[in-house]
Amino acid sequence: MSSALLVADNLHKAFGAVRVADDISFSINAGEVVGIIGPNGAGKTTLFGLLAGTVPLDRGSIHFGGKDITRLPTHQRAQLGIGRTYQIPRPFTHMTVSENLRVAALFGGGLEEAECDEWVKQVLDFTGLSRDSRTLAGRLSLLARKRHELARALATRPSLLLVDEVAAGLTDAEVDDFIALIRRVKNAGITVVWIEHVMKTMLAATDRLIAVAGGKILASGQPKEVIQSREVRRVYLGT
Ligand SMILES: Nc1ncnc2c1ncn2[C@@H]1O[C@H](COP(=O)(O)OP(=O)(O)OP(=O)(O)O)[C@@H](O)[C@H]1O
Ligand SMILES: [Mg+2]
């Protein structure tokens, strides 16, 4: 029996006349890595906002771990285990990498001061950032900045990690590093929903793919089949 960690039912969201979620329903099973693809402006980042509670829903419901979280504020959803990265990271640039992770662990993860040093060290090791631990976040290279964004989300100890476009702008080898990192996240028992335009990541690292456009789910299922589906090719390639 599959166990649904997250269930989104009939989500509706519009910005003025633009419908970014037009009756979207899906569920995410514990332990899965689910990819989300869709053209620019399809509403992918907004969907993460709806799940994390930073964007208010117009209509619909969201359950997480069997609990109705539809009306819970962001920080309570974070405490329950929903962590996310941002497409445009906004770390505390005047603080070091370690200090940023500490803040995430304290305020997002609810850790005690005394637990933080060891936990931050683990997250640094896990994300390959140990050498940058004392670097100011504002001075990181592009790759390290992306690792740091993932590390900040992991520091909050999520059971569900929402990853919004980390592969953009990276070299092929760096993309491979991220694929390996997301696999390690999955092996650590964390469920992942990953938005990405770089198709290689979606084929290599996801168990299932959901394609969205115009506020609707176009296709969902095996990654390869979704990417090759008529609906997705029509939206991406105009065929
Ligand atoms: N706070 C907001 N107010 C008004 N419109 C918004 C707001 N946030 C997003 N939008 C609009 O909603 C639509 C979906 O935006 P969203 O950022 O969710 O798309 P996306 O699929 O993540 O795109 P991309 O692939 O470029 O990141 C866009 O037309 C965007 O301009
Ligand atoms: Mg986006």
Image (cartoon, rainbow, N blue to C red):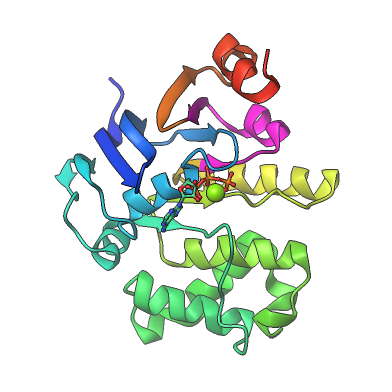
The outermost residue toward the top is 230
User: Residue at the spot x=68%, y=44% of the render?
Assistant: 180
Residue 46 lies left or right of residue 185; in this view the side is left
Q: Quadrant of the N terminus?
A: top left
Q: Nearer the viewer, residue 133 or 28?
A: 28
User: Residue at the spot x=54%, y=43% of the render?
Assistant: 41
x, y percentage for residue 56? 27, 55
Q: Is residue 1 visible?
A: yes
Quarter of the figure with residue 17: top left
- Whether 237 is drawn above or below 75: the answer is above
x, y percentage for residue 30? 36, 36
Q: Is residue 227 visible?
A: no
- Whether 221 is drawn above or below 94: the answer is above
x, y percentage for residue 199? 69, 32
x, y percentage for residue 50? 33, 49
Residue 68 lies left or right of residue 100; in this view the side is left
Q: Nearer the viewer, residue 21 or 126?
A: 21
User: Residue at the spot x=62%, y=67% of the render?
Assistant: 148
Q: Which residues are magenta?
A: 194-213
User: Residue at the spot x=50%, y=25% of the render?
Assistant: 208
- Whether 205 is drawn above or below 17: the answer is above
